[in-house]
Image (cartoon, grey):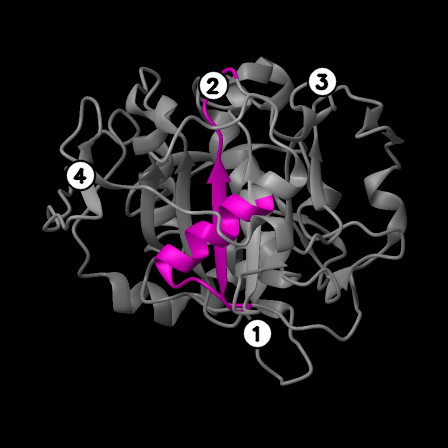
Amino acid sequence: MNGKGKRATLAATAAMLASLAGASFAGTAASATTRTPAHPAASPAVTMHQIQGTSLWMPQVKLRHRFAPHTVLHPRAGIVPQRGATTVLGHKIRPALGGGNLLYNGGPVAHTSRLYLLFWGTQWSSDPNGVESYLYYYTNGICSSGDYWVGTNFQYYDSSGGTPSCNNGSAFQGWAQDVGGPAPANATQAQIAAEAAAGADYFGATGTDAQVAVISPTGTHPDGFPNSGFCAWHSYTFDSSGNEVSYTNLPYVLDAGGGCGEDSVQGTLDGFSIVEGHEFSETETDPEINAWYDNVGYEIGDKCAWTNLFAESDAWGTFAQQPLWDNNSSSCQA
């Protein structure tokens, strides 16, 4: 689908969102104003953390991984390779464009995506680089007015006939910092999945429409990052009640520098939006890793990773993005 086609596809959404105030991540849009979220009332189990240098407030909660020993693991998918890497998690990288169009494999897609951000560990009480606020504004911008990039996802259907769609003008539905202790220095996939399941239990974020991004702090090495050659990946597990939990392992990609996108488009934090956008789209179109991928296993973001990076302006700011695979044109489209 070309840019004109996406604009037509999203015309109704843009019209509905036209009344939104023009908020922006600081420093990304010249005419932007700042939108200040309400400060939710604290409860005995929840305190509030003011994000450094902004008027944003984030809930701080102590999550219990009471089902960690029973965590169900599924394969990692949508693995974003570091730029220049030849192997990822011990496997040789195959050419991304050799697999043809994405093929439907019978599984569900997310119909109305709900994205939750979970900042893992007490280390996030300090955030001098402004990652928390950057991701807050970026994820609020997905599906907002001006976000034509997300429209590429809307062509991918499932057996119910449903396709991905925007959720009331924003993919973002909530965030929290888990202050139950520091994030592990070397978290395993099982620990990451258990953290995601605990976060999903707190947010009420289960089912194929919901996804939890588990964001690790600087200096930690979730699943061997950065020495394993990847920037992020997505998968799914189940909580203690048997509810599905889709999640992303999002390390502190700035620790990998240019290998994970630092200063690749417009600024230091570019990699966080490029990589999280990649995983968001793949979780939307392939939440159970049985819906849309090509004949070598690459998903909508994999086929276009690190190609033709660009900056997109939406109702919340201007952010670095990567193109996504468009079956209609058999090409990567911004």
Q: Earlier in the sequence, mark 2 or mark 3?
A: 2
Disc 2, SS: loop
**Residue 60 to residue 286: above or below:** above
What is the three-letter code of the residue carrying label 1?
Answer: Thr
At a point 15% along the width and 46% down the height, the residue shown is 37
Furthest residue toward bottom: 160
Q: Which residue is mark 4?
A: 48
Q: Earlier in the sequence, mark 2 or mark 4?
A: 4
Q: Which residue is mark 1?
A: 163
Residue 80 part of the magenta segment? no
User: Gap between marks 2 and 3, in whole Å?
Assistant: 14 Å
Whether residue 121 is visible: yes
Q: Which residue is mark 2?
A: 218
Give how far across and how far down residue 58 sits, in percent: 24, 40
What is the three-letter code of the residue carrying label 4?
Answer: Met
Q: Which residue is mark 3?
A: 227
For label 2, the crowd category at 10 Å Cα-Cα, with few meaning under 14, some 14 to 19 and many 20 or more, is some
